[in-house]
Amino acid sequence: MSTNSFGTLANMNLSSGEAAIYRLDALENKGFSIGRLPRSIKVLLEAALRLEDGFKIRGEDVERIAAWSAATAGKNEIPFRPARVILQDFTGVPSVVDLAALRSAMARLGGDPSRVNPGVPVDLVVDHSVQVDFYGDNAAMAKNIELEFKRNRERYEFLRWGQGAFDNFSVVPPATGIVHQVNLEFLAQVVRSEMENGKQLLFPDSLVGTDSHTTMVNGLGVLGWGVGGIEAEAVMLGEPISMLLPPVVGVKLEGELPAGATATDLVLTVTELLRKHGVVAKFVEYHGSGYRSLSLADRATIANMAPEYGATAGFCPVDEETLAYLRLTGRPAELVDRVERYSKEQGLFYGADAEDPDFGETLSLDMNTVEPSLAGPARPQDRVSLKNMKPAFEKLLDDRYPTQAARSKGAGGGLGDGTVGCFSIIRRSENSNPTVIILAGLVGEQAVGEIRAFACLG
């Protein structure tokens, strides 16, 4: 519970009744210019106000965040306690083991082991676990899942015990979806609600996760990024993260994607732009008329690539598209109402007439200039326009193998230099983007007849 030393606790109305919030604009009376702050910084500020206890989070921490500017960013250390933690099974299971060990230690010391629980909500999503042993028939999925449970019975029995034993802990079973997809489409609330002193308290959803691509959920206006297992466990136990107050780079998107260009082409172009500028240890926040034209799925694709362009997070503020996506994915009407009213009340909503924050660093991209592109697999910032693929490949070949004798001709029907192969055309960046998934399937279908296709995944 906050000490509320800044006197910002107030009430607001929802369709379902009254709720409490820690008002950001109340700090204007203390001499802070809150309206100019980037929305991602406002999320950090609200958490500090709400969780200020005079010990882990102090009044001077609140003041440092409220006084954010391009000049002070990156210089002052602040605490941030996210609203929740998301785990994937590879790094998440050891974290649950540690919680169980803490309970055992509590019992040995004569205490009540049931008092050991996560201090914030924790979701563990089991993904990348089901192997393809059966395929080619309608029952393949069920057979593969059954075999997965048999192979890893001890692990699943342990997780089932943990879900029943610990408060604030839930498990999403295997074959449900990849962790970032489940987070975006199901777990994320954008604005959370908890009971405090018998009253509903609202606050922004935020998180850390044990996977670098936790950043996908920023496409929904939920601030979050990946951390190591130790940092995740600290947050699980109620400890704030210690971090430098981040600089924020505003990326103004204008225009709209031309025919033939996809979200993947856009994100490769954005990655190239941001790698050149330098955004390591910074937040990136998107805005502009072009941003409003992007679907939520396209925003999630851009946010998911934050580790590739080097930013801590690529934040996409809440707007009408966010609300539409919440409805599309079956979120309750009460939640959608809560997100809209709270975001507007706190200056977090990016409406058509909203002024852009004072970022300090701003880049612009006209999306009309985005072209179909290729990049990777190891360096997505090395983007090549599709129309320039052949000359770029020939130059690379000449630079690496200047003599014809060193090149592979692919004699006898084998693979040679320049052979086009389709190995994988869908990855986690696009797994919540239906448009790109359908395009991948169409490309895969075409590839079977026209190019060498080794493992065409659509």
Image (cartoon, rainbow, N blue to C red):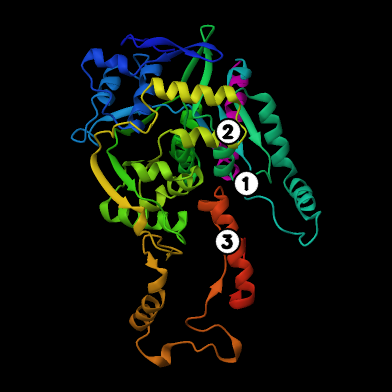
Element marked by disc 3: helix
In the rendered view of the protein, which quadrant contains the N terminus?
A: top left
Corner quadrant of residue 182: top right
User: Nearer the observer, disc 2 or disc 1?
Assistant: 2
- C-alpha gap between disc 3 and disc 2: 26 Å
Over which residues does the magenta segment extend?
Answer: 87-110
Observer able to see residue 422 = yes
Nearest the eye: 3 or 139: 139
What residue is shown with label 3?
440
Measured as percent of width and height from the top left, residue 409 is found at 50, 89
Q: Residue at x 32, y 53 (%)?
A: 366
Element marked by disc 1: loop
User: Nearer the observer, disc 1 or disc 3?
Assistant: 3
Is residue 188 inside the magenta stretch? no
Sequence-first tag of 2 and 1: 1
What residue is shown with label 1?
127
Observer able to see residue 455 = no
Sequence-first tag of 3 and 2: 2
